[in-house]
Amino acid sequence: MMKSTTLAAVVPVAIVEQAWQEVGASFERFCLTAGIATLATMMEEDAARLCGPRYGRAAGKDGHRWGKTKGKIGFHGGKVEIERPRVRARKPVPAEAGGGRSPCRAGRRPSPRTCWASGR
C-alpha cells in the first residue's frame, strides 16, 4: 500500500488561506471599479444638468463643457486617478465671492508667499 507524502491538515488550510486572499483582492478591485464607475456617472450627470447634453447647442445653459481632466480620489490610503469633465460657468462669479480675483485682491488673507508667487 502507498503512503501519502503530504500532510492532509496543512495543505487545505494553506489553499483556503490563499483563496481567501484572492477573494479579498478581487473584492477590492470590484469595489474600486464600481466606485469609479459610479463617480463618473454622477459627474457626467452633474455636467449634463449644468451644460446640457454633450455637443448640445441649447440656449440658457448655466455652464459649458471645457473638455476632461484627470483627478485623484483616495482609496485604501492611496490615490487613484480618474477622468472627470471640466465645466465652466457662463455667468461671471460675483466679486463678493472672489470670482476671478486672486486671494490677495479678494480681501482674503492668504500667505504672503501666495501673493508674491502670483505677482499680485
Image (cartoon, helix red, strand yellow):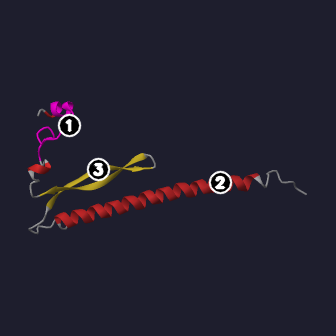
Q: Quadrant of residue 119?
A: top left
**Mark 3 falls on what kind of element?**
strand
Q: Quick check: can you spot residue 119?
A: yes
Residue type (three-letter) at the residue carrying disc 3: Lys
Q: Position of residue 43 (x, y in %)?
A: 28, 61
Name the residue nearer the viewer: 55 or 35: 35
* Residue at figure coordinates x 49%, y 56% from the top left: 28
Determine whether, in the image, residue 37 is placed left or right of residue 116. Answer: right
Name the residue nearer the viewer: 57 or 99: 99
Q: Quick check: can you spot residue 54?
A: no
Disc number for residue 17 = 2
How far is mark 1 from mark 3, CA to CA? 27 Å
Which of the two discs, 2 and 3, labels the residue nearer the N terminus?
2
Disc number for residue 110 = 1
In the rendered view, would you say 59 is above or below 78? below
Q: Which region is colored magenta?
A: 100-117
Q: Position of residue 97 (x, y in %)?
A: 14, 50
Name the residue nearer the viewer: 99 or 37: 99
Disc 3 target residue: 70
Determine contact: label 1, label 3, CB under 8 Å.
Answer: no
